[in-house]
Amino acid sequence: MTSNPAPTGQGLRPIREDWLARHSEPAIEPDLPIVDCHHHLWDQPGRTYLIEDFARDLNAGHNVVATVYLQGHARYRQDGPAEFRPVGETEFARSVAEQSLTGNFGQTKICAAIVGFADLHIGARIQDVLVEHIKHADGRFRGIRQPLMWDADSTVLLPGWKVARHALTDTQFRLGFARLAPLGLSFDACIFHPQIDDVTDLARAFPDTSIILNHSGFPIGIGSYASRRQQELGQLRQKLRDLARCPNVTLKIGGLGHPTLGFDFHAQPEPPTSTILADAWRPYVETCIDAFGPERCMFESNFPADKVSCGYVEVWNAFKRLTASYTAAEQSRLFSGTAAEIYRLDPKLAG
């Protein structure tokens, strides 16, 4: 079973609330409904971000109506067969969803949908694990995310990270992947941008399985990639256009505050404003929307991983600045509609 450390990549930096507090700004278009389609909750020694922490961000000004929980190695079961231990995270996310319904943490439906972890490399045996996830999610379980980032430059990876180069093409992995669609489950693809071609191949092989590409394709901007950002952006653009030809794929735009992208916001004396974020992120956001269109894209916060670089209000303000010229219908798809559709949330949440 995959037993990689978490969180991934260069994200193992502290969240500095005092640093973030040096800048504040009001929410732009505070009534616009948002479904935050990608967040985590952390419960690790020295690194916690639980419902109380997330609620403070959610209630800071934007109209976040619901969230989608993505696996983050939280609260695994401590005993039993190894392949079933990640079900503990689904149980944890369900309990958070139930807490949010009390109204004690605001009006957001936190963890309205849950995406958990399962090691698809165990092949057809994954069926029982998937059923166990579904059983313990109380109707909220939507799919699997199995992070499979690989790169020849090992410096972009967390020490100890072990993934095969072409894990998405592995025969056993695909035997496990084939079990998703019959159970109505999707797959969140978390890979680095040079691996997008493998996602395209996977999407073509399984046209009936919904695949959601995470983090704008996760473009690397550190290590050996730092000196060729424009060249890599061109490669990202072409790879996303090829992937977009697969109608079963949608794209999450976000994760752009993750240090792996190389913007180094976290290293500055002051936290970035939403204007600074929008200017830096514009080429990536425009590349994503150009490839997939607003109807197949959705914005994500990727909190708390991105919180090492910027505040929650600023993330959503940056996305709103970047789409200020879009129609109301296009904004609705990007901020809530696509996420509500793909993760099968109440369509009324999308306004």
Image (cartoon, rainbow, N blue to C red):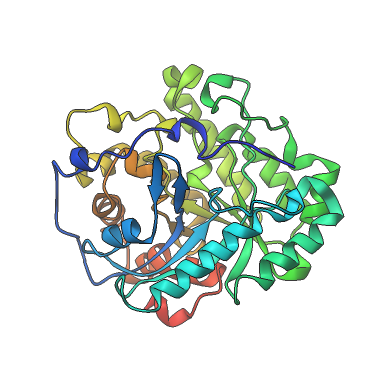
Please indicate whether residue 19 sits to the left or right of residue 66 in the image: left
Residue 142: image location, x then y, percent: 61, 67
Q: Eyeballing the image, is 308 above or below 137? A: above
**Residue 253: x %, y % from top left:** 44, 50
Identify whether 111 is placed above or below 41.
below
Left or right, residue 237 beside residue 279:
right
Residue appearing at x 38%, y 64% in the figure? 335
User: Can you give x and y, in whole percent of width and height, for residue 333 in the image?
Assistant: 42, 67
Which quadrant, please, contains the C terminus?
A: bottom left
Q: Looking at the image, which residue sits at the far front?
A: 79
Residue 287 position, x and y percent, is 44, 44
Q: Residue at x 61, y 35 (%)?
A: 149
Image quarter of residue 185: bottom right
Q: Is residue 139 visible?
A: yes
Left or right of 1, for residue 139: left
Q: Nearer the viewer, residue 221 or 109?
A: 109
Above or below, 260 against 298 in this view is above
